[in-house]
Image: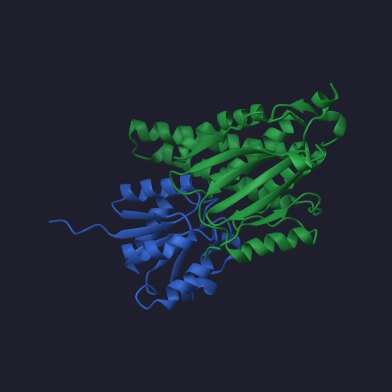
Chain colours: A blue, B green
Amino acid sequence: MSSPAERVVVVEDDELLAEHYLRILRRAGYEVYHAGHALTAIDVIDDARPHAILLDVLLTGTNALVLLHELQSHKDLASIPVVLATNLADQLAMDDVESYGVKRILDKATMHPEDVVAAIRWATRS
Amino acid sequence: MRVNSSEQTGVGALVSGVPSVSVAAHELKSPLVLLRQLSLELLNGDLTDSQRQRILEQMVSVSEKGLRLTGDLTKTETLQQPLFDCYPLNPLSVTDDVANELSGLYKAHGRTLRVSRIRHLPPVVANHDLLRRILLNFADNALHYSDIHGVVELQAQLQRERDIVRLSVRDYGPSLPLASWRKLTSSLSNKQQMQARPLSSGLGLYISHQFASAMNGHIGAIRHRDGASFYVELPVSRQLSII
């Protein structure tokens, strides 16, 4: 019997981009959930208990750092690895966000669909 | 947190800061990023025919959004009264145009843009193209803040005592956080460059303000318990009363 699929929560408020992520991650075999607002993201994450989170930085209602702070405040969610996919990659340093469980920062302007899958795979294995 | 009472702020004549090139570049980056990702997926992805069709439709609507923004930016640079004559027009003809123009984009997002009609709405003094662009901006913005599968309404309202018609785009989604709303209100009253909703650079509102001012109108916003309205107010045409 095959093992159950790993779960990923995508937090992205651009719906078409989110749909793109969902397609490529599902094709790669992941069970994928989506939160379109930072306000709902924590509930989706709490329900799905994902193996990794793909997170946009500029979000409706707040930004990713606020969400990362909140995740850290929940013992059971703090260890979930996070991949940031952002237009602000050139303004973010891994050193600044590593302590929040961020494993990789993807630049939306240069990444390829397979980079997203590879980053999630790397995050869930590390 | 939801706030019990709605809050309203006028935006007219409150925006003095001109968006920088970097703000415009940032706004244009998002559609380009999305187009690139979808193109790469089309090139490499193992897609069904229906997925391929959907992606192509999304690419068209995203391209059109980017083109609208570049068109608006160009117009703000050349905004001179003689180029944009104002004349009496039926505001509902503009709301219908906007609903038609955005129907594809709304469909791609699984949402509906509905025109709420009222009878006996008088003509306003406006420029069809500028008014259309303002409402396109508002409706485009509302798309990203409305509930999934939700409805966004284009509303028209006559305010007789003020001799104006207010055209609003009303979305039903999470209430704008109070802190963000206060930041918006504060930046407006301090005549700084507009801070819009958290995700936005405010460029769309800046453009809308410029267009409204060119028609002797103004824009504003209302924060509701369950979403927000962004509106433009325009003077009622007196042509009929003179006749």
Seen in the image, is B69 located left or right of residue B116? right
Q: Quadrant of residue A74?
A: bottom left
**Residue at the image point whose x is 37% and y is 74% from the top:** A79
* Residue B235 versus residue B25 in the image, above or below: above
**Residue at the image point whose x is 74% and y is 52% from the top:** B10
Residue B35 or residue A16, whichever sits in front: A16
Which residue, as the protein is rendered here, is positioned at the far top? B243
**Residue at the image point whose x is 58% and y is 59% from the top:** A88
* Residue B149 versus residue A57 in the image, above or below: above
The location of residue B90, given as percent across then percent down, is: 70, 27
* Residue B231 versus residue B192 in the image, above or below: above
Instruction: For residue A50, say whether it is visible.
Output: no
Assign the C terminus of chain B to one quadrant of the image. top right
The location of residue B73, given as percent across then percent down, is: 73, 40
The location of residue B172, given as percent across then percent down, is: 52, 49
**Residue at the image point whose x is 38% and y is 54% from the top:** A117
Residue B121 or residue B38, whichever sits in front: B121
Instruction: For residue B74, say whether it is visible.
Output: yes
Figure label count: 0
The location of residue B9, given as percent across then percent down, is: 71, 55
Residue B150 or residue B155, whichever sits in front: B155
